[in-house]
Amino acid sequence: MSDHEVGDTYEVVTEDLRREDFVRYAGASGDFNRIHYDEPFVTDAGYDSVFGQGMFTAGVATRAVREAFGIAGLREYRTRFVSQVWPDDTLTTTLEVESVEETDDGTRVDASLTVENDDGESVIEGGVVVVD
Amino acid sequence: MPTKSLDEIQALVGETRTTVEDFEIERGKVAEFARAIRDPADIYLDEDAAREAGYDGIPAPPTFERTTEFPRYRPEGVDDHTGFDLGFDPRRIIHGEQAFEFERPLYVGDVLTGRTTLENAYEREGQRGGTITFAEFRTDYETQDGEHVLTARATSLETGRAIADDGGDGDE
């Protein structure tokens, strides 16, 4: 039996992003696109400042998945990048259980995934599937 | 616009190339990556804690596959980590979507090979004008024992205008 029910929500808040977060993610992931850390380069290109790697935010959001479900039974993790993440943003990751189903492999839980900034604007929309 | 025509790009749909070799899941890299995504869980740091929590070893965070962007995992002769030169303007490439399908977590000690297929390519008109070219890639990963563990799907797009106007994250 699953501990999860349709409508259950799980939330993780990640406070006060800093340029340092984008730099650390670049170093850890190998994504060295300059738009994420080179302020003169991006302001010349017309942006207000550097902004985070989409996969940085997608990575941050996995904490909510781990806390809610663990990752041993994680079968799908889907993210669509809706808008950018900027220094000083605070991100809220929310998972909401949409279905719980008994299958031959175990209990399958489908949940929606959203990451919002402190203006309530979506930066990532997606979903997860967990079977255990 | 890409330097290749849509016909030239679509002619590559269905092709598969080895894009990742000798991708060893290393303990130090996993710890660094977990810190970079601000997840302090001890399962990413300590094997005993991971086994106590029911894992078969130290798991990699779900998005760790993206570290294949480091050139050390790229086979000789593959210039781009997608394995395909579609003629996209690097200043206008956006990472639109990313999905992972897991058979199981990646564990420290796994050594993976990845093969990438260009699954689809098409054009759409952007909301604010300009043509957007989409490319969908699928990369299948096998362990050193030939076990298929992960499928990664990435959608890249090249915008016809400055990327500031089109959302996305500005990545490849």
Image (spheres, coloured by chain):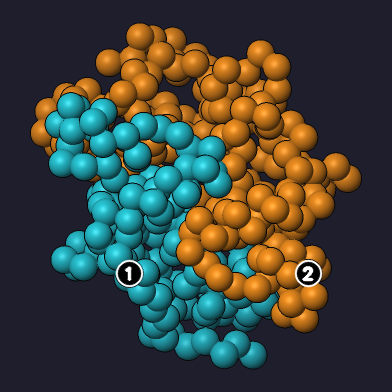
Chain colours: A cyan, B orange
Q: In this view, which residue lies farthest toward the left?
A: B128
Q: Which residue is mark 1?
A: A15
Residue at x 36%, y 22% (from the top left corner):
B90
Label 2: element kind: helix
Q: Nearer the viewer, residue B149 or B31?
A: B31
- Contact check, label 2 and label 1, Cβ < 8 Å: no
Q: Could you tell me the amino acid type at mark 2?
A: Glu
Which amino acid type is shown beneath numbered disc 1? Glu
Q: Is residue A104 above or below residue B20?
A: below
- Residue B159 coordinates in the image, percent (x, y): 26, 27
Residue found 57% across the figure and 60% down from its top: B34
Residue located at (12% from left, 28% from top) = B129
Percent of width and height locating residue B43: 68, 71
Marking on residue B131: none
Q: What chain letter is assigned to the residue under label 1?
A: A
Give a yes or no on whether discs 2 and 1 share a subunit.
no
